[in-house]
Image (cartoon, rainbow, N blue to C red):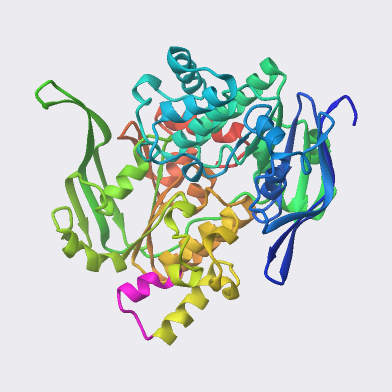
Amino acid sequence: MSQDNLLEIRDLAVEFVNGDACQRAVEGISFDIRRGETLALVGESGSGKSVTAHSILRLLPYPQARHPTGSIHYEGHDLLTLDEKKLQHIRGNRIAMIFQEPMTSLNPLHTLEKQIGEVLALHKGIVGKAALARTLELLELVGIAEPHKRLKALPHQLSGGQRQRVMIAMALANEPELLIADEPTTALDVTVQLKILELLKSLQARLGMALLLISHDLNLVRRVAQRVCVMQRGRIVEQADCETLFCAPQHPYTCELLGAEPRGEPAHNQVGAPMLQVQDLRVWFPVKKGFFGGTTEHLKAVDGIDFTLHQGQTLGIVGESGSGKSTLGLAILRLIASQGSIRFKGQAIDSLAREQVRPLRRQIQVVFQDPYGSLSPRMSVGQIVGEGLRIHGVGTPEEQQEAIIDVLREVGLDPDTRHRYPHEFSGGQRQRIAIARALVLKPELILLDEPTSALDRTVQRQVVELLRSLQQRHNLTYLFISHDLAVIKALSHQLMVVKHGKVVEQGDADAVFSNPQHAYTQQLLEAAFLCGHTVV
């Protein structure tokens, strides 16, 4: 093993065994990670990136997964054959990992203070006041505002981006030699993406830490990586230093990834009657109570928002994590309490009881940000997609099966996979299942809450084109929440920019993108440009 290399992977192959069936997820790949460098592993969902990363710390679901060939050498040890006790010392201490979906990695019953403190106690023996001070330092380091107020928060009380930052704080707690970052910026808006990438670079320089960055976004890794490995269908198809790969890509698949930014114009539909009208919508959460129980403070997640969305149009809502975008969506869906007026097709729905809202669910569907958290692990894909059809009594069982098959084809999934379960799919495939579940009822209004955040750029383009064609064909209305300005621009007719629960800029999407008036909108567009995304 070369002294310059921290990790050497040779001829690694990974198989998943299910009864007599055997599927190769990784096909004999080899690469090195040098001390202190950043190596990026890029490719589409299902290309084998995460399986490769999980193999390093033997985190795959054994015995269903097995390594028929290969070795992973770290400090003279083959991690694939190392005994569990020695491997446990390396996990989270010498080699740490940031996972793609923080909601499935964080304990829903434990506070942030307890979860970060557990890492410090287990590996460093740091407890008490020292652990509290270190926890606050880590939360501040990853950009959690007012960290002392978040110590007692549970994961579900944070936005998707905030949860991801907590995961990064936990991974950095022990200052590892190698940090494996599996899509670390997937759930983050562009401004925070820049902050996290700059944070990882500065920590790398300070600690001499190596970084294995796994991403589906080649433009994003360009800012931080020294070398890049491109994976397709379990194989490395191209491996080069960053400058060479971006300036002179050799493999057609690399060229495809580099040109996969979502493009095109929103669907050209005739503007119909108002579908959704929102006036002075407020969602305030009490965060502090006085001695006798009187509320003295509120977190104003949504604070007096107004808009009108017409049939056949898409309203894009952008803003940083924690700006109130998803809370606004939940209030419109009547999934959380709110004040103000909400009218759907002229009908006031803000004062309806749960039983009265239920019939409207068929007309108003939603695709959530975290597909793994919103898909039941005990239900097959067919059952998940067809659940709405059964609840609303749409069609005979045979017609329901036919609708399930058709919609799976529409979102780019093999209908034969409807008998499988969510854990058997990649993150991007799970998001497509969630989209299929919403589309199968043929609703009039769809709330899309970060629907492409877990998808690689090539699949993002496909999904954007799918949503556009469906909107044109069925005159659908979309409320599209995202931090990805390239996707927003490709789909939205109107744009609303939200910060700290308030609208700071609103209007025709093309006008806002071409001539932003508010400093915050200008900041978002500048950050998107620095991340390599074309939005103007």
Q: Residue at x 46, y 31 (%)?
A: 115
Q: Quadrant of residue 175?
A: top right
Quadrant of the image containing the C terminus: top right
Magenta residues, start to end: 385-396
Which residue is nearer to you in this view: 176 or 184?
176
Asked whether 390 falls inside the magenta stretch, the response is: yes
In the picture, measured across the screen, residue 107 lies left or right of residue 208, that is left
Above or below residue 190? Residue 406 is: below
Asked whether 300 falls inside the magenta stretch, the response is: no
Measured as percent of width and height from the top left, residue 512 is found at: 43, 40
In the picture, measured across the screen, residue 380 lies left or right of residue 178, that is left
Residue farthest to the right, as pictured: 2
In the picture, measured across the screen, residue 100 lies left or right of residue 232, that is left
Above or below residue 472? Residue 39 is: above
Measured as percent of width and height from the top left, residue 70 is found at: 84, 48
Q: Is residue 321 visible?
A: yes
Q: Residue at x 43, y 13 (%)?
A: 129
Q: Residue at x 26, y 56 (%)?
A: 276
